[in-house]
Amino acid sequence: MARLRWLTLPLALLVLIALSLYRTKTIRRGVRSNADDFEQQTLAAVKIPTDKEQIWQNGSLAVDKTLLFNAWIGGPVPSYFERFLDGVRASEMHLLLVSTYDSPELCPTGHDQPRSHSVYDKIEVICVDMETLVSDAASALCNHWGCGDGSLRGVHRALSEYLALDGQALNSFKPVYRTIFAKQFAEMGRRYPSVGFSHWLRIDLDVILGDAPSLLPAHLLEYDAFTFSPGPSMDYTQVYLRGYLTGFRMSPEVDTAWLGMRTFANAKTFRRHYHGRGFDVRRRMGLASDEGDLSVTILSDARYSWIVEPGLLVVDLDLETDPVGLIAYSSQNIAVRYGAARPSNSAPIIMPTDASLELTSKCYMPWLAPVDRVCLRRNGSLDRYSRSGDAIRVMRARGGLICAERISHQSDVRRLAYHFQDSKHALRYGLESSCIVQRTRSKTWRKDCARS
């Protein structure tokens, strides 16, 4: 019995050791399995996207949150309108088109036609008759000006006369689009309530969008206004808000920035600048308030933040008179005739500059009245960067100083956007009126006028 008891003790110890080893092995196996799972989850979470994925990831926010807008009262749409729509569709952005009933493609005349309709997915057209447009615009503007009944009638009459000049007259009111088309913007918001637009982008029909996510990086949404320059081919000092492609934050403060403009300050100054009686259409280039007066107001006021993003590829062609200028088009590439394109950029290396930047009115902007010109004062270091082929990004935070970044890059074939035009420099402010009158009196005056 004692001998059996002596054998039981070692067996018990062996059993205890075996159980201990089994438990330890099981625990270690569990820890190793959990560690493997954790490592796999972590690698998946920090997966580095490819260049293309990164572009779409960064650009998708701005593309989704920015509403394209255009107002058309010019009768039949231009022949390149379908190409414009192709670019919008490829960008997958939302577009709001407001048109009057004299446009057969958008809003054909007839009581049985719908007031609003979808052209394609995310592309909406809202139709309005001219009298309603004028009445709504006059009331909206006067609500801010505090017009009396007599002043309201005067604003209504001036609007009616001016818009009757031709289809381009409405371009003069781009600075007040968010005000005079407030109902249409609100209706677009109700149609797409889940989007939550934060910015809107005024776009002309002669702008063909290419790679929208690259054109609209997410950081643009940090600013009250954003516009574009063609990159190294463009003088970095020209920071004005492009009339054909500029975005704005949807906020009461930015929506009413036009109240600081000289031409829209009050009802009296408005009627003095915009009317139809004796108006010389050839001098309208001097009333390019979207690029002149509004640029002065926003760029020079530290309450507004803004950025000029380099890289927009601009081509000065007119598709209406030169339809073969655009050879091929796809969502990622736009081909034009040799020599018509300017270099684009890629692989940016962003380097802040130590330049101290200031605005000036001494600018070469011949299509604008001198009082409406604004640009950057030249800076030696930025001149050197620009001459070396670097693009210059210029920006201003709210309440901050104007600063710049140089973007080193290599040229590639990606096309971000094209703007087709041939009329920007065709007219010179004052040349068609004052210079002709004074031509026989003074050769010096004629030269000065042509140069201004």
Image (cartoon, rainbow, N blue to C red):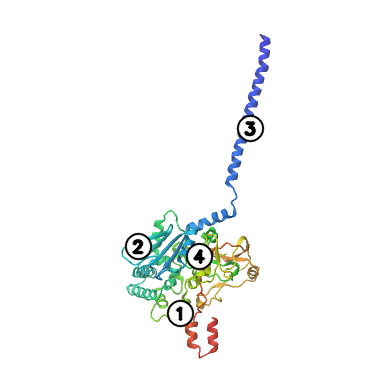
Does 3 appear above or below 234?
above
Nearer the viewer's eye, disc 3 or disc 4? Answer: 4
Amino acid type of disc 1? Arg
Q: Which residue is mark 4?
A: 208
Could you tell me if residue 76 is visible in this image?
yes
Q: Quadrant of the N terminus?
A: top right
User: SS class of the residue under badge 4?
Assistant: strand
User: SS class of the residue under badge 2?
Assistant: loop
User: SS class of the residue under badge 3?
Assistant: helix
Q: Which residue is mark 3?
A: 28
Q: Which residue is mark 1?
A: 282
Q: Which residue is mark 2?
A: 115
Does 51 appear above or below 420?
above
Q: Are marks 4 and 1 in contact (CB under 8 Å)?
A: no
Work out how far the residue at label 3 is from the one at label 4, CA to CA, in angstroms: 62 Å
Name the side, left or right, on which 154 lies relative to 88.
left
Identify the image quadrant of residue 391: bottom right
Work out how far the residue at label 4 is from the one at label 1, CA to CA, in angstroms: 27 Å
- Position in image of residue 378 (x %, y %): 61, 72
